[in-house]
Each structure stands twice: as structure tokens, then as C-alpha cells.
Amino acid sequence: MNPTFAIPKFRLPGFVAGIGHKLPQWPHALALVGGLNAALKMNLLPEDGLTALEDKLFRVRVLDTGGEASYTYRDGMFRPVFRPAREPDLAFAANLSAFLQLLARQEDPDTLFFNRELEITGDTELGLVVKNMLDAVEWPSLPQLPFPGR
């Protein structure tokens, strides 16, 4: 992460979520699963935690966009679930800024959870497995782009 850039806390206007709820949700699931499977192929996710994810149902809700994605891990791959037949084993809900801060490692899940910016529901033990997996991810370094004046 660029130390001079910080993702601010923000909340999109309410009408965005109102519109987002009415849009198809399958693109969100495909994008999330695509990213997770790319992380698998790049060996970014620790293999020892993956067995605990087998056949579990997960849901991610981005509250201020109205977006939602459900997925599972089965037979070595993350797979979208377009019409979940049951409640998820583990669910996450937060505003877009909180998820971006997590992804950029600007904030950790515990801080966001205790500040009531990240909601985690479901199987506590499974939640700890996922948190530990995310903590263990070593993001590859991106090359610095040459900018004039630097």
C-alpha cells in the first residue's frame, strides 16, 4: 500500500443501496469468486485452512451499495451460489469503505468489528479460520509506477 494514500471512511448515499438492491446480484458473486480463485491459483491462501471451508456457505453484503454475493468452497474451488437454499454458515456485512480498508490492510477485521463497522454472523470457529487465513495472506508487491515529481 502506498503510505501517502489512505482510504477514508465513507458511506455512499442511501439511494445507491436502494438502486443496488434492485440490480442482479450474480455479477457480484462471479467477481468475488473469480478473485478468490485467482488467489488460490497464486497460492496466496494457506492450504491448511481450506479444508475447514469445504461445503460451507458464505455471504458478503456491501451495505451502502446494495450488493450481495453468496459462495461456497467445494472440490478445491470457490463457486458462486446464486440462490442460497439456507442461511450462510458465515456472513460478513459492511460498507464499501470498510471492505476496501480491509483489502488494503489499512484496518484489521477485529478493529472494524469492535467499532461496529463490520458485522460478522454465523459460525464463530469458522470465522476465526477465515480471519486467520486472511491474516496469513502475503499480497504480492506491485511495482511502483514512475510519476513525474517523485
Image (spheres, grey):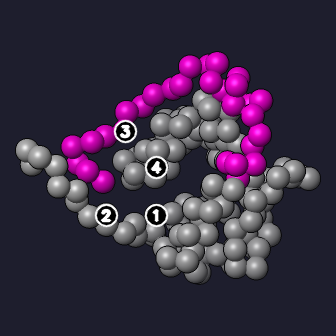
In the image, residue 92 above or below residue 32 = above
Question: Tag 4, which secondary structure?
Answer: helix
Classify mark 3: residues with Cα within 10 Å, few (<14), some (14-19) or many (20+). Answer: few
Q: CA distance from mark 4 to mark 2?
A: 17 Å
Q: CA distance from mark 1 to mark 4?
A: 10 Å
Earlier sequence position, callout 3 versus callout 1: 3
Residue 100 place in picture, x, y as percent = 46, 44
Earlier sequence position, callout 4 versus callout 2: 4
Earlier sequence position, callout 3 versus callout 2: 3
Judge depth for marks 1 and 2 and give the one in front.
2
Judge depth for marks 3 and 2 and give the one in front.
2
The amino acid type, in three-letter code, at marker 1 is: Asp
The amino acid type, in three-letter code, at marker 2 is: Leu
Q: Quadrant of residue 78?
A: bottom right
Earlier sequence position, callout 3 versus callout 4: 3
Judge depth for marks 3 and 4 and give the one in front.
3
Q: CA distance from mark 3 to mark 4?
A: 10 Å
Residue 135 circle label: 1
Question: In the rendered structure, does residue 115 fall within the stretch colored magenta?
Answer: no
In the image, residue 101 above or below residue 73 = above
Question: Tag 1, which secondary structure?
Answer: helix
Please name the residue shown 46% across and 49% down the image: 102
Residue that carries the numbered disc 3 in the rendered image: 7
Residue 102 circle label: 4
Please name the residue shown 27% across and 42% down the image: 5
The amino acid type, in three-letter code, at marker 3 is: Ile
Taking the view exactly as shown, the residue that stands out farthest to the left is: 149
Judge depth for marks 4 and 2 and give the one in front.
2
Q: Is residue 111 left or right of residue 41?
A: left
Q: Quadrant of residue 94?
A: top right
The amino acid type, in three-letter code, at marker 4 is: Leu
In the image, residue 14 above or below residue 55 = above
